[in-house]
Image: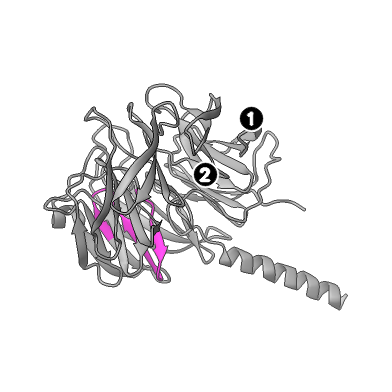
């Protein structure tokens, strides 16, 4: 009996430790590529869908949840404030809450005046960018404000079509953002500890894409898909290492998907007749391996990459119904395409692609180039759902304009 109890205790302790070690600390996950490494999910849901572990009431916003050290950060708008809450990931109990004034209104009447950017947890802090350009650094444990910066005022940055939406990325001692400011402040780096400007670069307007950091050549690089196109910069100095113009010809358009890095190649995709490009990085240049509007033209959802094949939603959300497609990365050739998904967000968990649609359906699809195979689909929340979910230790964290829902996708023995 003692041995049995000890064994059960150790199993429980190991499970708890695994939950605490597992993180989804930023937009698109640990590697900012939509991949949940090591996750082996259960997708035999039945008609009712995965079990709900807990729910938490939130307000408007397209900002996704992030998870670190057994805690969840969620940002939303309620009344005259943008609010950031820290929750216990096991119970949903609120640990702290911080509010900041906001008067942002969606200029297109989309009835969503909440934050667009997803917070980032790094260096014991929470970094966020509000819809009006307010950058905040909060202490992760206490919620105490460490520093703040009104980037719109400081750099004369315009609101754009839908406010500010660049999810911060932290590299070294820098918080990197595409804000579209004037006088060479299209991209900025702020000191992690103080918020002081470290450097600014380009005159590029802001897009709705978030940056990614990767090894490019012999050193680190940060990739920004701005309104003008792709920029590869030195994250330490802001010097531009390479550029590739890529945007729609019409003014009323946006670049929104995050670049995908595969060794020395970078994949970018946009809608509005722009299409996709696979670029070879060589110091000083980004040269096309191929370009095509027949591959994946993503409106806002970043595709996922597995074993040399990309899976993504192809087509504009506001003018038709996007299809889920699989293409070969090396050539851009379509392997299969399937209608019936509409807008949504994707993440990769092992051999499964999870698609959370704008209407609140969760689908599990086999990540195989051979043929489309849907494993499960269920309605898990009310629409409209545009925030990217997080997957940590078998738990899927998803939100709409009313609530954060945590679903149990853990593999059953």
The circle on residue 371 is: 1
Q: In the drawing, does residue 228 fall left or right of residue 339?
A: left
> How busy is the neighbourhood of tag 2: few (under 14 within 10 Å), some, or many (20 plus)?
many
Q: Name the colouring of the figure.
A: one colour
Q: How crowded is mark 1: few (under 14 residues within 10 Å), some or many (20 or more)?
A: few
**Is 334 located above or below residue 301 in the figure?**
above
**Left or right side of 271 for 10:** right
The residue furthest bottom is: 2
Choose top left, top right, bottom left or bottom right for residue 7: bottom right
* Depth check, front residue: 6 or 178: 178
Q: Give the range drawn in magenta.
A: 117-135
Q: Which residue is drawn at 62% across and 69% down?
A: 17
Rendering quarter of residue 38: bottom right
In the image, 180: left or right of 409? left
**Residue shown at the point (19%, 59%) measured from the top left:** 200
The quadrant of the rendering that contains the N terminus is bottom right
Judge whether residue 288 can be spotted in this image.
Answer: yes
Residue 6 is situated, as x and y percent measured from the top left of the image, at 79, 75
Q: Does residue 214 belong to the magenta stretch?
A: no
């Amino acid at each position: 009996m003692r041995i049995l109890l000890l064994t059960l205790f150790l199993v429980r302790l190991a499970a708890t430790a695994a939950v605490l070690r597992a993180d989804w600390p930023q937009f698109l996950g640990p590697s900012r590529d939509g991949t949940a490494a090591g996750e082996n999910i259960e997708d035999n849901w039945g008609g009712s869908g995965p079990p709900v572990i807990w729910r938490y009431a939130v307000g408007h916003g397209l900002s996704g949840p992030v998870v670190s050290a057994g805690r969840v950060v969620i940002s939303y708008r309620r009344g005259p404030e943008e609010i950031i809450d820290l929750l216990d990931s096991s119970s949903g109990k609120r640990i702290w809450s911080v509010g900041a004034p906001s008067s942002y209104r969606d200029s297109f009447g989309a009835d969503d005046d909440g934050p667009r950017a997803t917070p980032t947890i790094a260096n014991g802090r929470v970094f966020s960018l509000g819809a009006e350009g307010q950058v905040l650094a909060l202490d992760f444990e206490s919620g105490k404000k460490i520093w703040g910066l009104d980037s719109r005022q400081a750099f004369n940055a315009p609101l754009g079509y839908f406010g500010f939406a660049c999810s911060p990325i932290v590299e070294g001692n820098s918080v990197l953002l595409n804000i579209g400011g004037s006088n060479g402040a299209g991209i900025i780096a702020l000191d992690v500890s103080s918020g002081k400007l470290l450097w600014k670069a380009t005159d590029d307007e802001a897009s709705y894409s978030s940056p990614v950091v990767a090894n490019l050549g012999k050193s680190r690089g940060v990739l920004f898909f701005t309104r003008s196109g792709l920029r590869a910069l030195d994250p330490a100095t802001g010097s531009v290492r390479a550029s590739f113009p890529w945007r729609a010809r019409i003014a009323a358009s946006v670049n929104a998907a995050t670049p995908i890095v595969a060794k020395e190649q970078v994949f970018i995709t946009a809608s509005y007749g722009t299409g996709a490009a696979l670029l070879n990085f060589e110091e000083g240049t980004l040269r096309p391996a191929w370009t095509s509007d027949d591959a994946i033209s993503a409106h806002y959802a970043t595709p996922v990459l597995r074993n040399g094949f990309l899976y993504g939603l192809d087509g504009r959300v506001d003018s038709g119904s996007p299809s889920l497609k699989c293409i070969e990365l090396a050539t851009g050739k379509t392997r299969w395409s399937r209608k019936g998904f509409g807008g949504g967000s994707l993440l990769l968990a092992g051999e499964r692609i999870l698609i959370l649609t704008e209407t609140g359906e969760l689908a599990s699809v086999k990540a195989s180039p051979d043929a489309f195979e849907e494993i499960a689909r269920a309605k898990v929340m009310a629409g409209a759902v545009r925030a990217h979910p997080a997957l940590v230790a078998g738990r899927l964290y998803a939100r709409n304009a009313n609530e954060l829902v945590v679903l149990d996708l853990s593999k059953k023995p």
